[in-house]
Image: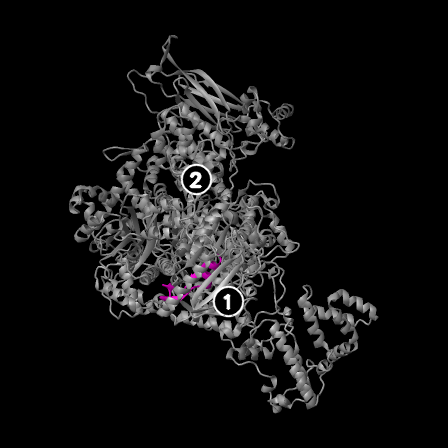
């Protein structure tokens, strides 16, 4: 040995050092074998000795001397000439090493400085060069008087120390001789061995909140193990066992300077929650400042029973406090709080269900006073979505929370609102289930990073050695949130005994010894008068142990120790015991013993707990559930045996440390004992394990790597990990990563690897790649090794969702087949990886064999030996379904485990089959899954699911023919007879009613040869029973091929109780491929009920597949035409500003459009330049037909507006053209329209106007109609387009003036049909989608079906972000989303995803000043947030200025992304490089479900991709559901076939034509239909329209005849409906006459059903509520959207209004109720908080005026005066936004109804204000009297001056002609342009108008009504036309009275008998509340009727209004058809769509 060569002095020195070392070791109380323990070098880094030391200890060899490793030859290779090795330092005794050692000693004794800091300061002082006395005092101040000898040594050897220091800092390498090198090495080695053991403080840092009573320096080894048992521990050896005793620690006391926190000093929130407490305990008081006053993450390690739950409560209160008003932190006194309960969630993760239940109860009770709900969410306790929304605190288990967060989207409501995550018992990390905790924390921490939301994580755990690692893992700031409390914080100190019983584990000797030891220990405790709990590990054991203890007590004559009879409560207890049914309890209690386990009845358990707490029972034998679930302490606990059966592992395993700690936590009752005693009796081989684990000597390690593959799959499925680098990052969040760095060896990491890669990137990459490869082999993900990209596949997603291991998936991939039967499925489930650990034990084989042979238990044969896991699993699974119960305890546990897992696996298999489209397999698997859930086979009768007597069920099974269908046909008595129990007949009949089957009807319509549209109508076939069905029933509905059972389409259908009686419709398309099956099956299978399934066969016998005659125009390779081809300098100048040449498409169509009159159909993609093509046709019209008009029809207001804006600026101004916009929002007067050259309008508006084409000259002057987006024929508004085209053709034919038609669309599949209908000969141009100015790359991404729309949308956010980074990292992007809410949510998620990037504002391109300036202009909060990250929002709910700002910033590239709804695609021409269509469904309130977008919308969105001036290509990504992917692929490339939907709304259009008298017979109606597109398509595609023709008869004469019959039926049906609404009169000979009601319907563009409702319900004397209700019932409001959950908002609104929504008799989700509420809100002037509602209210008001005007006409026709006036009042109220009960003055600014006081003022009307004629003095006075605020007075004056003062003159006609002239003259001048009224709340400007009502007030009868508007000429010109500000206009109405009924003749004898009629004249404002002028009793001379003549209806066109059918050419009445005088009257309207009669 090398040391033999040492000199004598050295040897002596060596020995002395060695002895010192041993002494030091002895003091530290370490074991003898620890003598070689490593000492950490001061800087905490490893050095070589440490490694060797670790390695040697692992190999069991004590470390040897350094010379053993280095030979002399090696010495030459070791060089000491680096500047780091300083031999001089070691030369003298007083060197730097000595200083370091002494400083370490000092700092170990004193808290304060660390040794390194102390050493630095000492050296600073010594080298300062000050005199010695100064140095002395400085050193004494620093070190203290206890260490004076150290100071004396320092001063005495100051020179040597300074010399050593100078040498140490000396620079440059020095060469040494070999002997110097050897000497240096020796010195170094010696110094190393001399260092005392104290320097460990540098390694274990001092953290402020670590409370340890005593710390002997470094007590942890490198891997974190402790070196020794606590002081005072003893070990004793006995004959049958050995025992380690660890004494109880001292009970802790308050630390100096600390005091307990008094509850009284806390704020109101804490005081109320901690009621009944006086203070927090020691531990909680220390935690309080951090837990309650900060949001720090925390780890609290404390012994069981120290009060961790209350510490957690403090963090819960802190979180709740942030959502309280008033804020408890600011208002200390308040105890009454309002909670914003919807804004947060708190999740408490408890390790066991039992504990979860206890915590739920505890938290729930404590927080109930705040109204906070706490619910358990575990495997047993499922919460519905509504319950989740209502709950603020959710207590769950790790697995359950993992499942919830794995969905990522399903429970977003939950996951995204979490603000606090509490993880109880974090030390579970080292358990099997630890991996789940790791994935949860990693997921949460990533969520915190990605969403920038604060989620506080609080970990609670028992004391554990490496708490610092756990703190690091939980992201805890160790200086703030790390709390460690040692055993002194236990409420009762614990004395622990570890007993190892001798004998081979499991042998009889060992078991007997265990019993004996347990008895001895119990006896010892009883002798000390302690109560004892004996914990055993199975229910049966509790009884056996109790009996064993009693028998042994009898043997040893110590029964008296157990005897309870002398207890004072014994008598009472015995009475209670009599009531229990359990025999064993009755036997044991008198003996003083009790038992307790989860299998007992709840009452029995409560009894046991009570008797033990009272002390009647001395010994309680129980299972661990008692320790977890119930807080019942005992003086002593004994754990008897540590073998627990685990069904999951299929064997006995060691009792978990968690359980031991929990059980020990029950030892010691604070009020009785000062120590508790915990004993654990185990076998000798396990003794060391429990000893080290319980005394926290083993650091906890990670179990993550074992579960890495499945956890990685979950993250990939979630979308949070999409590449290997992300996976590597994800691993870094795990505890595995923390421990791999601390203890690399334990994880198989070589030292060299760790040295090279301290961050372990290589190792993590290796783990990730291995896992990804494994997943790819199992087909769960797609792993592209080149790009390192990871993408989830459906199987991976299903595995993640159902928690299936990848090993099982591999088995399923191999074994699944499309036609497997039950037997194969059972075998496959049994083979899955989840059951690998099921083990077969010899003692079970008999019972298992017996079960296997019994066909009642195991109906399906099983091959293989009983000893195989899969055979055993299969037997148990089948027995479970057959309701078998094994006798053996372990087998029973296995049975439950198997059932639990199998149910989940079977569901996963079902989803996989559904995914693979295997129909037969789905049916079998779904039935099997339900069998497992219901414990009933699918071959048994479905009624086994009900609770019926056994004999009845036997009868059901015996009779094969008794199917549900057959039974439904029978009478109850018949059924009773069949089951031999008549009494049951009725009950069974009732259950049959409740059996939840659906009936399904299918309609099929082929879209083209290859695609079939299917509509399913679903009707529930049962009566709902809440007890059986709960709130909803779910079904899988799928369509399968009848021959191959391949699934074409599947949907999950949820039937809600609330919507049980609604219409349920499913709409989808399926592909058709040759050969066609003869039929397809539609299956509706219940998700819960066995046997509840229906099959509907859909025959293809009548299916005619239309030939797809796609005619496409090829783009010719032409020379682009220059603009000079126009040969018109004015036009060339206009175009030269934009381009010099027409593009290829325009060049090709130029000649046809510009030089010929041909009709043209132009199909080409969005963005290809169709607008210029339309302009070419316009120039043709103006050139060839001067003076004619061009009508441009666009399907949406937004497009109209865009066109007006564009053409107005670009064409109209330079060329002097007149443009006019005609929409619902904007209706100019007749003269403007007559003067216009170009009319730009919507289909509805033009339809309404062109209906009266005979009377409207300008309609007849039209020479060109341009219909944009004509492919929208197929949409909701298509019929209107169809009618317009048909009408224009009809007009052209009638007037012999050709009208040229130009239809423009995207490419469509059946262009030739459209062209034929439009009369196109040579003008058909149908270009393909590829003819775009900028080529498009199109990608269609399918997303898996996620239940729920929002989750699906959310799952698309990350892919959207990646698409942006991928395709368009710096070019503009538009993301289209389906709803306004989605714009906000998508933007928020994109912002979050940016937050994880290096540059979170990567999408923003403006500087801070510019940004702030723009933000200051924004009103919407969501938009503000988005813009600051470079993202804009765009939807109809934003105010105009916000929308424009978003467009402007996007256009100028200041923001890169625009998230918009589809309105942007249509309305605004904003192209982008990349377009993402995020989701292709939207919520349709009418059907209350999500519906697919029209393909046209999608095409329009794609049209925005690619910017002609910047991009060479555009990119579009469509994100849709997997099922829709093929549909889009197919149609986006071929174009969509256009079909008609006219047949669905024919009634109203026929009604309009009858009113216009275009149709006067049924034959006319049929001829009219032949003009339509519908007629052409009916013959081409009969199946689509439901016309059944056999395929072979298609196109034959018979088919023609069938089509004719079909049309006749349609016409008859429509006319009958119109006649029922009193809108037409149909005569037997086929003639059809219009009626006044029909004319009103057509004139006001209303549905005949609106008129029908009014006619049916109208009555005299209607109240305001009546007229409001009638109006709101209008069919026009059917379309009003009611969005998701708006019924709740409606209900809230309803509570605050005059008339509740319920007064309507309709549910809150009905659109009519919403209209009713919105109108009231308008009149109540309630500011609606929701933008959507503001938009909805505007559209309700839009329609309202038209509906009210029509209603006035209808009631006039019916003659009810009072009701007509009530409607006029409603019109006034709607315009003024006032209630009729309010003072009319409240209309004026600054006047509230309550300010108008006093009867006189209340009676004052607006006409009184008008009479003041704007006199400033009077108005000022009035303002003062009304208390108008000073600032508002100018506005008040202006409005008051606008009030009309009108003079009404009534002149009776001469010559007895029955004429009456009413003249209105405005006495004060008009102050507003066009005579607008003051109606600030009404969205559109209204002009002053008047109703002149001729009536007989006494008889409540209306004779006539006329509408008047001002004209300056005074002869009743157009309303509002030519009314100038400052003028005093007048208006006149001449009314001819109809002859009265004979009863009302009044005879005057003035010469010749003449007659007069008395009438009353009422003049009412149509806009100001309460303005009314009356002239009563006007006598009108009447002509004498010829004798015997009847009252005649006046000739049409006289322009007069008569009762029963006169007219005013506008409003109501009969003369509407061809009347000459009507046109002049069709003047201005109310800003709505109807005119007013102003003659």
Q: Nearer the viewer, residue 1886 or 550?
A: 550
Question: Is 1188 situated above or below 442?
Answer: above
Q: Secondary structure at mark 1?
A: loop
Q: Residue 233 at what x, y percent from top left?
A: 54, 67
Residue 611 colored in magenta in the image: no
**Quadrant in the rendering for residue 14:** bottom right
Question: For mark 1, does the 10 Å Cα neighbourhood hold few (<14), some (14 to 19), or many (20 or more) residues?
Answer: many
Q: Is residue 247 above or below residue 997?
A: below
Which element carries disc 2, helix, strand or loop? helix
Residue range (magenta): 637-665
Q: Quarter of the image for the C terminus: give it.
A: top left
Which residue position holds label 2? 1258
User: Quadrant location of residue 1673?
Assistant: top left
Q: Which residue is mark 1?
A: 700
User: Mark 1 near mark 2, Cβ–Cβ under 8 Å?
Assistant: no
Q: Position of residue 503 (x, y in %)?
A: 39, 71
Q: Position of residue 741 (x, y in %)?
A: 55, 71
Sequence-wise first label, 1 or 2: 1
Quarter of the image for the N terminus: give it.
bottom right
Please give the name of the residue rendered at 50% of the width and 72% of the height, measured from the top-left corner.
Answer: 765
* Towards the viewer: 499 or 979: 499
Q: Residue furthest bottom?
A: 73
């Amino acid at each position: 040995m090398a040391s033999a060569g040492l000199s004598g002095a050295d040897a002596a020195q060596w020995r002395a050092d060695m002895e010192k070392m041993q002494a030091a070791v002895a003091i530290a109380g370490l074991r003898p074998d620890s003598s070689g323990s490593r000492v950490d070098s001061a800087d905490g880094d490893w050095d070589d000795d440490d490694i060797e030391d670790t390695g040697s200890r692992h190999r069991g060899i004590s470390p040897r001397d350094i010379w053993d490793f280095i030979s002399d030859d090696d010495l030459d290779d070791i060089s000491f000439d680096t500047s780091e090795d300083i031999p001089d330092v070691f030369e003298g005794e007083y060197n730097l090493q000595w200083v370091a050692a002494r400083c370490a000693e000092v700092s170990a004794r004193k808290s304060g400085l660390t040794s390194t800091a102390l050493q630095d300061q000492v050296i600073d002082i010594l080298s300062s060069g000050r005199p010695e006395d100064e140095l002395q005092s400085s050193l004494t101040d620093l070190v203290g008087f206890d260490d004076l000898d150290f100071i004396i040594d320092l001063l005495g050897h100051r020179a040597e120390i300074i010399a050593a220091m100078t040498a140490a800092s000396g620079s440059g390498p020095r060469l040494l001789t070999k002997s110097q090198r050897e000497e240096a090495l020796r010195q170094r080695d010696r110094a190393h061995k001399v260092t005392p053991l104290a320097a460990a403080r540098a390694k274990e840092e001092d953290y402020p909140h670590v409370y340890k009573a005593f710390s002997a320096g470094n007590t942890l080894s490198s891997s974190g193990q402790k070196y020794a048992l606590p002081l005072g521990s003893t070990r004793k050896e006995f004959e049958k066992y050995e025992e380690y005793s660890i004494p109880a620690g001292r009970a802790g006391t308050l630390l100096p300077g600390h005091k307990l926190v008094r509850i009284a000093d806390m704020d109101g929130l804490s005081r109320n929650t901690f009621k009944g407490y006086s203070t927090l305990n020691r531990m909680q008081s220390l935690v309080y400042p951090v837990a309650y006053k900060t949001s720090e993450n925390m780890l609290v390690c404390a012994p069981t029973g120290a009060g961790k739950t209350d510490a957690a409560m403090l963090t819960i209160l802190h979180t709740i406090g942030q959502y309280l008003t008033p804020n408890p932190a600011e208002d200390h006194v308040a105890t009454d709080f309002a909670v914003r309960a919807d804004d947060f969630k708190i999740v408490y993760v408890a390790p066991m269900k039992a504990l979860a239940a206890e915590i739920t109860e505890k938290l729930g009770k404590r927080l109930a006073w705040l109204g906070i709900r706490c619910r358990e969410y575990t495997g047993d306790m499922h919460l519905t979505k509504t319950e989740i929304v209502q709950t603020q605190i959710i207590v769950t288990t790790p697995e359950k929370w993992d499942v919830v967060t794995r969905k990522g989207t399903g429970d977003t409501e939950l996951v995204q609102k979490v603000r606090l995550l509490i993880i109880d018992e974090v030390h579970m990390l080292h358990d099997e289930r630890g991996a789940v905790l790791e994935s949860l924390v990693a997921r949460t921490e990533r969520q915190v990073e990605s969403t920038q939301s604060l989620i506080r994580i609080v970990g609670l755990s028992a004391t554990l050695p490496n708490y610092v690692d756990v703190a690091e893992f939980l992201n805890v700031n160790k200086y703030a949130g790390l709390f460690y409390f040692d055993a002194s914080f236990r409420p009762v100190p614990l004395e622990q005994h570890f007993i190892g019983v001798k004998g081979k584990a499991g042998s009889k000797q060992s078991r007997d010894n265990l019993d004996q030891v347990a008895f001895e220990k119990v006896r010892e405790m009883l002798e000390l008068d302690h109560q004892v709990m004996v914990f055993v590990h199975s229910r049966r054991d509790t009884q056996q142990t109790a009996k064993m203890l009693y028998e042994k007590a009898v043997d040893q004559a110590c029964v008296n120790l157990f005897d309870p009879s002398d207890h004072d409560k014994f008598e009472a207890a015995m009475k209670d015991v009599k009531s229990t049914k359990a025999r064993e309890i009755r036997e044991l209690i008198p003996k003083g013993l009790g038992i307790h386990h989860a299998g007992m009845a709840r009452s029995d358990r409560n009894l046991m707990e009570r008797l033990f707490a009272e002390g009647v029972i001395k010994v309680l034998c129980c299972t661990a559930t008692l320790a977890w679930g119930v807080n019942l302490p005992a003086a002593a606990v004994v754990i008897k045996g540590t073998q627990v059966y685990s069904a999951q592992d299929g064997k006995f395993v060691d009792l978990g440390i968690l359980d031991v700690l929990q059980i020990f936590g029950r030892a010691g009752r604070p009020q009785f004992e000062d120590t508790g005693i915990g004993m654990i009796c185990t076998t000798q081989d396990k003794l060391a394990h429990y000893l080290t684990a319980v005394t926290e000597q083993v650091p906890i390690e990670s179990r993550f790597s074992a579960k890495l593959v499945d956890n990685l799959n979950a993250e990939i499925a979630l979308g949070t990990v999409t590449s290997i680098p992300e996976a590597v990052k994800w691993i870094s969040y795990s505890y595995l990563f923390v421990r791999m760095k601390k203890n690399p060896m334990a994880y198989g990491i070589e030292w060299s690897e760790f040295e090279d890669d301290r961050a372990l990137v290589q190792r993590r990459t290796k783990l990730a790649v291995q896992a990804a490869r494994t997943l790819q082999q199992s087909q769960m993900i797609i792993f592209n090794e080149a790009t390192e990209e990871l993408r989830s596949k459906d199987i991976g997603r299903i595995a993640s969702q159902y928690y299936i291991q990848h090993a099982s998936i591999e088995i399923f991939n191999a074994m699944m087949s499309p036609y497997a039967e039950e037997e194969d499925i059972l075998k496959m489930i049994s083979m899955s990886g989840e059951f690998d650990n099921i083990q077969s034990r010899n003692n079970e084989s008999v019972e298992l064999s017996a079960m296997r042979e019994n066909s009642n238990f195991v109906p399906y044969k099983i091959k293989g030996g009983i000893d195989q896991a899969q055979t055993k699993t299969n037997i148990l699974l089948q027995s479970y379904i057959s309701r078998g119960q094994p006798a053996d305890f372990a087998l029973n546990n296995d049975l439950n485990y198997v059932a639990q897992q199998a149910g989940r696996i079977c569901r996963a298999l079902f989803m996989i089959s559904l995914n693979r489209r295997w129909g037969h397999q789905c049916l079998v698997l779904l039935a099997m899954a339900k069998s497992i859930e219901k414990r009933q086979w699918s071959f048994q009768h479905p009624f086994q699911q009900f609770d019926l007597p056994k004999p009845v069920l036997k009868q059901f099974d015996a009779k094969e023919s008794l199917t549900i269908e057959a039974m439904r046909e029978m009478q109850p008595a018949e059924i009773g007879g069949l089951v031999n129990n008549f009494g049951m007949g009725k009950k069974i009949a009732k259950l049959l009613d409740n059996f939840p089957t659906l009936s399904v009807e299918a309609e099929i319509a082929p879209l083209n040869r290859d695609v079939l549209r299917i509509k399913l109508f679903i009707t529930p076939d049962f009566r709902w029973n809440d007890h059986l069905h709960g709130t909803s029933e779910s079904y899988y509905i799928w369509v399968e091929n009848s021959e191959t059972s391949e699934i074409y389409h599947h949907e999950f259908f949820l039937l809600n109780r609330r919507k049980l009686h609604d219409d349920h419709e499913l709409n989808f398309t399926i592909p058709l491929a040759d050969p066609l099956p003869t039929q397809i099956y539609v299956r509706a299978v219940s998700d819960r009920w066995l046997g509840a399934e229906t099959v509907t066969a859909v025959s293809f016998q009548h299916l005619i597949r239309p030939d797809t005659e796609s005619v496409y125009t090829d783009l010719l390779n032409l020379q682009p035409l220059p603009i000079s081809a126009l040969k018109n300098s004015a036009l060339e100048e206009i175009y030269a500003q934009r381009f010099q040449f027409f593009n290829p498409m325009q060049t090709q169509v130029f000649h046809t459009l510009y030089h010929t009159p041909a009709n043209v159909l132009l199909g080409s993609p969005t963005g290809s330049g169709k607008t210029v093509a339309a302009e070419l046709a316009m120039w043709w019209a103006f050139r060839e037909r001067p003076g004619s008009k061009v009508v441009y029809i666009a399907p949406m207001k937004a497009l109209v507006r865009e066109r007006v804006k564009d053409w107005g600026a670009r064409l109209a101004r330079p060329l002097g053209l007149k443009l006019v916009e005609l929409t619902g929002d904007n209706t100019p007067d007749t003269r403007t329209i007559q003067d216009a050259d170009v009319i730009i309008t919507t289909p509805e508006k033009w339809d309404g106007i062109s209906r009266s084409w005979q009377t409207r000259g300008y309609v007849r002057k039209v020479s060109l109609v341009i219909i944009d987006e004509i492919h929208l024929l197929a949409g909701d508004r298509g019929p209107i387009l169809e009618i317009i085209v048909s009408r224009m053709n009809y007009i052209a034919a009638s007037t012999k003036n050709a009208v040229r038609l130009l239809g423009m669309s995207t490419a469509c599949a059946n262009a030739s049909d459209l062209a034929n209908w439009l009369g196109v000969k040579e003008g058909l141009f149908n270009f393909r989608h590829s003819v775009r100015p900028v080529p498009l790359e199109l990608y269609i991404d399918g997303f898996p079906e996620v239940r729920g729309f929002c989750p699906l949308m959310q799952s698309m956010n990350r892919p959207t972000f990646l698409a942006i980074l991928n395709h368009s990292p710096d070019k503009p992007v538009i993301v289209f989303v389906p709803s306004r809410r989605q714009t906000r949510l998508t933007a928020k998620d994109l912002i979050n995803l940016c937050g994880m990037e290096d540059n979170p504002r990567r999408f923003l391109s403006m500087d801070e000043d510019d940004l702030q300036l723009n933000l200051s202009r924004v009103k919407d909060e969501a938009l503000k947030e988005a813009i600051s990250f470079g993202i804009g929002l765009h939807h109809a709910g934003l105010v105009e200025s916000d929308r424009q700002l978003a467009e402007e910033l996007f256009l100028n590239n200041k923001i890169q992304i625009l998230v918009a709804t589809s309105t942007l695609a249509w309305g605004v021409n904003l192209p982008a490089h990349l377009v993402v269509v995020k989701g292709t469904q939207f919520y349709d309130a009418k059907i209350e479900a999500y519906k697919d977008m029209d393909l046209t919308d999608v095409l329009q969105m794609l049209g925005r991709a690619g910017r002609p001036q910047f991009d060479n290509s555009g990119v579009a990504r469509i994100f849709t559901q997997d099922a829709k992917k093929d549909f889009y692929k197919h149609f986006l490339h071929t174009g969509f076939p256009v079909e008609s939907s006219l047949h669905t709304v024919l009634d109203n259009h026929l009604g309009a034509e009858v009113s216009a008298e275009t149709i006067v017979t049924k034959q006319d109606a049929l001829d009219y239909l032949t003009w339509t597109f519908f007629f052409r398509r009916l013959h081409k595609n009969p199946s689509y329209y439901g016309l059944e023709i056999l395929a072979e008869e298609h196109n034959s004469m018979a088919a023609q005849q069938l089509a004719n019959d079909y049309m006749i039926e349609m016409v008859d049906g429509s006319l009958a409906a119109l006649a029922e609404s009193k809108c037409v009169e149909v005569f037997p000979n086929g003639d059809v006459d219009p009626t006044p009601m029909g004319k009103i319907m057509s004139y006001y563009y209303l549905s005949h059903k609106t008129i029908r409702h009014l006619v049916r319900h109208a009555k005299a004397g209607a109240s305001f509520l009546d007229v409001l209700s009638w109006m709101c019932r209008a069919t026009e409001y059917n379309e009003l959207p009611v969005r998701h959950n708006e019924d709740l908002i409606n209900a809230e609104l309803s509570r605050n209004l005059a008339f509740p929504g319920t007064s309507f008799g309709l549910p809150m989700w009905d659109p009519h109720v919403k209209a009713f509420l919105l109108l009231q809100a308008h009149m109540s002037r309630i500011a609606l908080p929701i933008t959507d509602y503001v938009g909805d209210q505007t559209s309700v008001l839009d329609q309202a005026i038209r509906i009210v005007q029509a209603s006035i006409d209808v009631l006039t026709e019916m003659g009810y005066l009072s009701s007509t006036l009530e409607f006029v009042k409603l019109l006034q109220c709607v315009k003024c936004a006032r209630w009729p009960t309010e003072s009319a003055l409240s209309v004026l600014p600054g006047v509230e109804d309550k300010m108008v006081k006093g009867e006189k003022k209340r009676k004052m009307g607006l006409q009184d204000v008008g009479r003041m004629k704007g006199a400033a003095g009077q108005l000022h006075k009035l303002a003062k009297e009304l208390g108008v605020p000073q600032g508002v007075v100018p506005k008040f004056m202006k409005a008051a001056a606008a009030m009309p003062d009108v003079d009404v003159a009534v002149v009776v006609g001469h010559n007895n002609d029955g004429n009456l002239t009413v003249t209105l003259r405005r006495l004060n001048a008009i102050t507003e342009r066009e005579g607008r009224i003051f109606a600030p709340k009404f969205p559109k400007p209204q002009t002053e108008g008047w109703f002149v009502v001729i009536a007989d007030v006494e008889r409540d009868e209306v004779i006539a009504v006329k509408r008047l508007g001002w004209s300056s000429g005074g002869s009743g010109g157009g309303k509002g036309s030519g009314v100038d500000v400052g003028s005093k206009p007048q208006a006149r109405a001449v009314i001819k009275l109809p002859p009265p009924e004979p009863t009302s003749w009044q005879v005057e004898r003035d010469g010749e008998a003449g007659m007069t009629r008395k009438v009353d004249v009422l003049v009412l404002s149509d806009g100001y509340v309460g303005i009314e002028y009356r002239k009563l009793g006007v006598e009108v001379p009447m002509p004498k009727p010829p004798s015997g003549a009847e009252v005649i209806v006046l000739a049409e066109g006289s322009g007069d209004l008569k009762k029963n059918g006169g007219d005013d050419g506008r409003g109501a009445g009969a003369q509407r058809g061809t009347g000459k005088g009507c046109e002049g009257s069709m003047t201005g309207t109310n800003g709505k769509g109807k005119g007013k009669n102003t003659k």
